Amino acid sequence: MTEYEQTRQAYKPEKIQVLLVAESPPPDDFAGGSRHFYRSEPRTDDRLFMNTIKALYPETAEMSEEEIEKEKEKWLRRFQADGFYMTETLEKSVPRIVKKPERRKLIEEALPRLIERLRELCHKNTKIILIKSNPFDVAAEPLREAGFNVLNKTLVDYPGQYNQTAYREKLAALLK
């Protein structure tokens, strides 16, 4: 089990109500980057965490990113208590230089293992939301065919440098 997976496990709800599925886990901590959803130490530019919290909790709308980051542990615990959990289609981090066709191929190859992992995480009423085009385009139908409740019928954009507003709006709408 990777260090990040151990960190993630500390925030796993007893019963997952909503499972958010992104593309790949963050790089090792020493590699830097902004994708460190479950690492509770404050990080600048943690877009996936920040925009997820802003989509789920309306009281954060007027809070600065710095204010939210200072209390990241509190928000992660609330996310957990409310039955939310975040995982990825792939089990290993994918460097930014890997292009979209290769990413899709990796997800296609990982589908059997993804289905197995989701069966371990989900119960019959767990709602799944796929984040980013590659997970959505490649995995949505196979997951539905495997009996999972995939909520999104259209893409939920990854909240990278762009698409942050679209991500928050789409995620909030799916959970209403």
Image: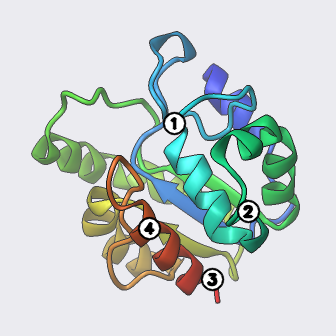
Residue, disc 3: 175
User: Which mark identifies residue 60?
Assistant: 2
Residue, disc 1: 45
Is 30 on the left or on the right of 112, as rendered?
A: right
x and y percentages locating residue 47 in the rendered image: 50, 46
The residue closer to the viewer here, 114 or 98, is 98
Sequence-first disc among 1 and 4: 1
Q: What residue is drawn where x is 57% and y is 30%?
A: 44
Sequence-first disc among 1 and 2: 1
Q: What residue is drawn where x is 60% and y is 48%?
A: 49
Is 71 on the left or on the right of 122, as rendered?
A: right
Is 110 on the left or on the right of 85, as rendered?
A: left
Question: In this picture, is 157 found above or below 88?
Answer: below
Q: What residue is drawn where x is 37% and y is 48%?
A: 160
Q: Secondary structure at mark 4?
A: helix
Q: Amino acid at mark 3?
A: Leu
Q: Amino acid at mark 1?
A: Asp
Residue 1 appears in the picture as rendered = no
x and y percentages locating residue 60 in the rendered image: 73, 62
Q: Secondary structure at mark 1?
A: loop
Crowding at dot 4, Cα within 10 Å, few <14 / some 14-19 / many 20+, comes out as some
- Numbered disc in front, either 3 or 1: 1
Sequence-first disc among 3 and 1: 1
The residues bearing labels 1 and 2 have C-alpha atoms spaced at a distance of 16 Å
User: Which mark identifies residue 165?
Assistant: 4
Q: Residue furthest bottom?
A: 176
